[in-house]
Amino acid sequence: GGGGGGGGATGLAALLENECPELKGKKVVLPLCGGNIDITVLGRVIERGLAADGRLIRFVSTVSDRPGGINGVTKILSEQGASIKEIFHERAWLQSNVYNVQIKCVIEVTDREHGIRVHQELINQGYPTLMMNESEAGSEFSAQSQQKLGQIRPQGLRI
């Protein structure tokens, strides 16, 4: 059926029977659910909430594919107080320069403004970066980043 089950009904019953007089006149949230929510579903709900609040951010950046190439980005993220949730790099589908790799990251930040500061710092430090909202990074970003990185000789890339 519907409803919240026994766990959800307990709080409602307490309010209806005036068992919580200290709450009178206050704004109160009463969850009408039981305690049997699937932990995996709860995790997805929390992640979607973080993303909607601008606290969970996806981005793509192009870095050197030499040892230590990803280290520059992770160092900036650490210095900026961003927490790395996921990082993945692609070699095979990046067009043009074989000395570069695209990394896809998911980071957690404190708020939207913090995310903007992190993005700006990555760009300032020479890492072409596209923050992704609803759309994925496409060939346009790849071409732009390759053009920018193509101006730097391979031995001059950050590692």
Image (cartoon, helix red, strand yellow):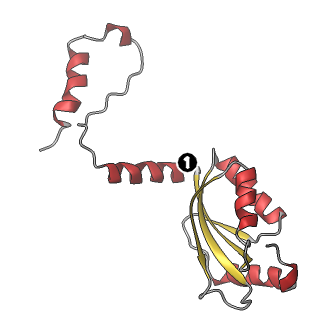
Q: Is residue 84 left or right of residue 143?
A: left
Q: Which quadrant of the figure has residue 131? A: bottom right
Q: How many marks?
A: 1
The x, y position of residue 110, in whole percent, is 63, 44
Q: Quadrant of residue 118?
A: bottom right
Residue 119 shown left or right of residue 104 in the figure: right
**Residue 153: x and y, percent?**
87, 85
Residue 19: % across, % down: 25, 11
Image quarter of the C terminus? bottom right
Identity of the residue drawn at 20% across and 37% down: 4
Q: Quadrant of the N terminus?
A: top left
Residue at point 73% right, 71% down? 68
Q: Do we see residue 58 in this rendering?
A: yes
Give the vertical position of 152 relative to 83 (above or below): below
**Front residue (pair 132, 153):** 153
Q: Residue at x 82, y 73 (%)?
A: 158
Q: Position of residue 108 (x, y in %)?
A: 59, 52
Quadrant of residue 111 within the rendered picture? top right
Q: Is residue 152 visible?
A: no
Q: Where is 115 relative to 140, above or below? A: above
* Side (left or right) of 153 relative to 130: right
Report the residue that reaches farthest toward the top: 21
The amino acid type of the residue labelled 1 equals Asp
According to the picture, the residue beneath numbered tag 1 turns out to be 53
- Taking the spot 79% from the left edge, 65% from the top edge, the residue there is 123
Q: Is residue 125 above or below residue 25?
A: below
Dot 1 falls on a residue whose secondary structure is loop
